[in-house]
Image: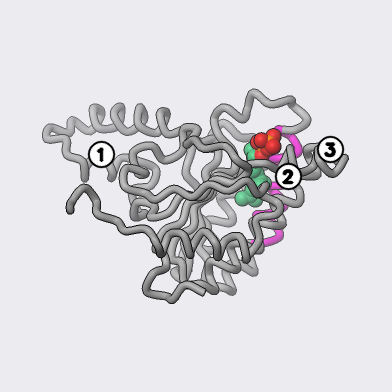
Amino acid sequence: MVDSQNIPRHVAIIMDGNGRWAKQKGFPRTYGHKVGTENVRKIVKYCSKRGIEYLTVYAFSTENFKRPADEVGALMKLLVEYFNKETQELKENGVRLNVIGDISTFSPVVQEAIQNGIEKTKDCTKLIFTIALAYGARAELVRAFKNMIADSVQDITEEIVSKYLYTFDLPDPDLIIRTSGEERLSNFLLYQAAYSEFYFTNVHWPDFDENEFEKALEEFARRIRRFGGV
Ligand code: FPP
């Protein structure tokens, strides 16, 4: 087990493979998302136990709206259930819910469940759990540039750009994990990932358990991070 000094402060995860996991088992894709959501619950607990301060997951990209309406509907339902059912326990465990992305594109019921979860857990500090919803990194950058112009920002620096991103109050991710075999960022945290370590695994998200997470932490602990220096 990796000792606490070598644990990344911020882990971000692209939770891929719910659909393929379900298909392999002869279930509908939406069942994969259901089990995937249960796994989110387990991984949040595990991150808290391992002393990770920030966990960010990619749950719904701007592109995911292109999926069939029944799948989008099922994902929205799972989200509402997650926020409604988990908020109290997350609060008791010191987990603050945070969202990045443009949730104004979601229905009022979904937005309300999300806002309620954020509001109720706002004073928690043990783990900041950020869910990327209707998120796309390019759209995030465009929004940042527009807001900088609106604010008449004169001297644009890297730090100022960071402050105009949805992630203004989060450190950059130290480790980015992607499950299910694909090795790309898919419009996730493009600016923030400049010096992140990447970990790819063939395991589908519903099967990415504590053991698999520990393997990613072990790999991270073996990497030497130079941030462009020597
Ligand atoms: C990728 O699998 C997964 C998604 C697009 C959705 C992830 C959402 C959840 C796990 C549920 C809600 C999350 C929270 C935080 C409550 P895929 O469908 O792209 O799988 P495939 O590539 O095998 O088709």
The residue beneath circle 3 is 28
The reply to whether dot 1 and dot 2 touch (C-beta < 8 Å) is no
Q: Residue at x 64, y 69 (%)?
A: 89
Q: Residue at x 37, y 49 (%)?
A: 196
- The residue under label 2 is which amino acid type? His
Nearer to us of marks 1 and 2 is 2
Say whether mark 2 is within 8 Å of ligand 1.
yes
What span is in magenta? 72-86
Q: Quadrant of ligand 1?
A: top right
Q: CA distance from mark 3 to mark 1?
A: 42 Å
Residues 210 and 56: in front is 210
- The residue under label 1 is which amino acid type? Val
Q: Relative to residue 165, is residue 20 drawn left or right?
A: right
Residue sitting at the far left? 155
Where residue 33 is drawn, which disc sits there?
A: 2
Question: Is residue 113 visible from the viewing direction of this image?
Answer: no
Q: Relative to residue 196, is residue 126 drawn left or right?
A: right
Badge 3 or badge 1: first in the primary sequence: 3
Say whether mark 1 is within 8 Å of ligand 1.
no
Magenta stretch: includes residue 79:
yes
Badge 1 or badge 2: first in the primary sequence: 2
Magenta stretch: includes residue 163:
no
The reply to whether dot 3 and dot 2 touch (C-beta < 8 Å) is no
